[in-house]
Image (cartoon, rainbow, N blue to C red):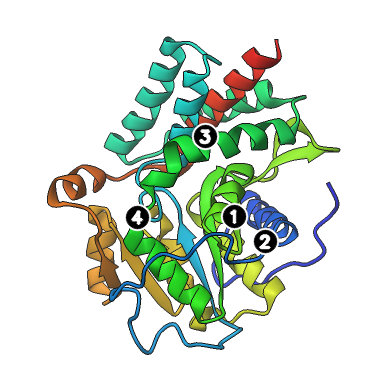
Amino acid sequence: MAALGWLTTRRRPATARSVLAGEAAAEAARKSALPTGAEEPPAASEEAGEPPFPVAGDTRAAAFFDLDNTVMQGAAIFHFGRGLYKRKFFQRRELTRFAWQQAWFRLAGVEDPEHMQDARDSALSIVKGHRVSELMSIGEEIYDEYMADRIWPGTRALAQAHLDAGQKVWLVTAAPVETATIIARRLGLTGALGTVAESVDGVYTGRLVGEPLHGPAKAEAVRALAAAEGLDLDRCAAYSDSHNDIPMLSLVGHPYAINPDAKLRKHARSLDWRLRDYRTGRKAAKVGIPAAAGVGALAGGTAAAVALHRRRR
């Protein structure tokens, strides 16, 4: 992988791995940025038009949207795993293991470094040697089957308001950048920042670039992309459901809590951030449990890797 051609100035301490992950995600996002308006835009929403923001014609502003439970109901990588299971790429016991692992982290709301490392190593060891194009091809089919109908109309309307104002809109997620890019393109967004697995000549090497794009690494990715695109973060917006994304939300001048978990809701209210909740009361109570998005993505990524491995054999 070529060396990064630009570095960013950080306003707070960050680990070298989170900086590397963020800058790699930003570089990948810029290379794969797509024209907007790929699909018919959704009907206008009163909630989307919240004058005076976004400001039409402000090219130094952009919007950054978390994916899981912000733009889409549930975890993208888990839906991807469902599609692979349907195709009999792995066994029920493996699907149960991945689902349990994700559920455990949702309930605990904490990240065990050893557990996280194990999931990461398992995924990368199986993905090694497989082509990126194979994962992309499978993802296109699964988006139509499991993800298209899970997009929150209210959040998509917010994204469309930014696009209509002439601003770029990026997904920011711990899911693999290939999966995130498929979703961004289908929604007509500019592109996606996601976890980058190293590849050479289109083949996975079995290593991550930095670490999963989660928590502080998301903030580093947004910071790096803003620097490369000439954006003014004080004029940008960010949207998320999780307290894990407070570092990213704190970077911008217009932070929004969307379908927030309990910790983010409390934090947002204390700082007078705007809140939006598109769930019913029952769903809000369930989804409001803190989630460790990075590990959830890794667990799902392991499922995807197992499936690819089995299919190739």
Query: In this picture, is 312 found above or below 156?
Result: above
Q: Position of residue 254 (x, y in %)?
A: 41, 77
From the viewer's perspective, tell me whether residue 1 is left or right of residue 224.
right
Which badge, 2 or 4, is on the more N-terminal residue? 2
Which badge, 3 or 2, is on the more N-terminal residue? 2
- Residue type beneath disc 2: Leu
Which residue occupies the foreground of this view, 305 or 273?
A: 305
Which residue occupies the foreground of this view, 112 or 251?
A: 251
- Residue type beneath disc 3: Ile
Q: Position of residue 25 (x, y in %)?
A: 66, 54
Residue that carries the numbered disc 2 in the rendered image: 34
Locate residue 98: give its quadrant: top left
Locate residue 275: give its quadrant: bottom left
**CA gap, disc 1 and disc 3:** 14 Å
Which badge, 1 or 2, is on the more N-terminal residue? 2
For mark 1, give the secondary structure: helix
Locate residue 155: give its quadrant: bottom left
**CA gap, disc 2 and disc 4:** 22 Å
For mark 4, give the secondary structure: loop
Residue at 68% x, 74% y is 229
Disc 1 and disc 2 in contact, CB within 8 angstroms: yes
Mark seen at residue 142: 3
For mark 2, give the secondary structure: loop
Which badge, 4 or 1, is on the more N-terminal residue? 4
Which badge, 1 or 3, is on the more N-terminal residue? 3
**CA gap, disc 3 and disc 2:** 20 Å
Residue that carries the numbered disc 4 in the rendered image: 152
Residue that carries the numbered disc 1 in the rendered image: 185
- Residue type beneath disc 4: Trp
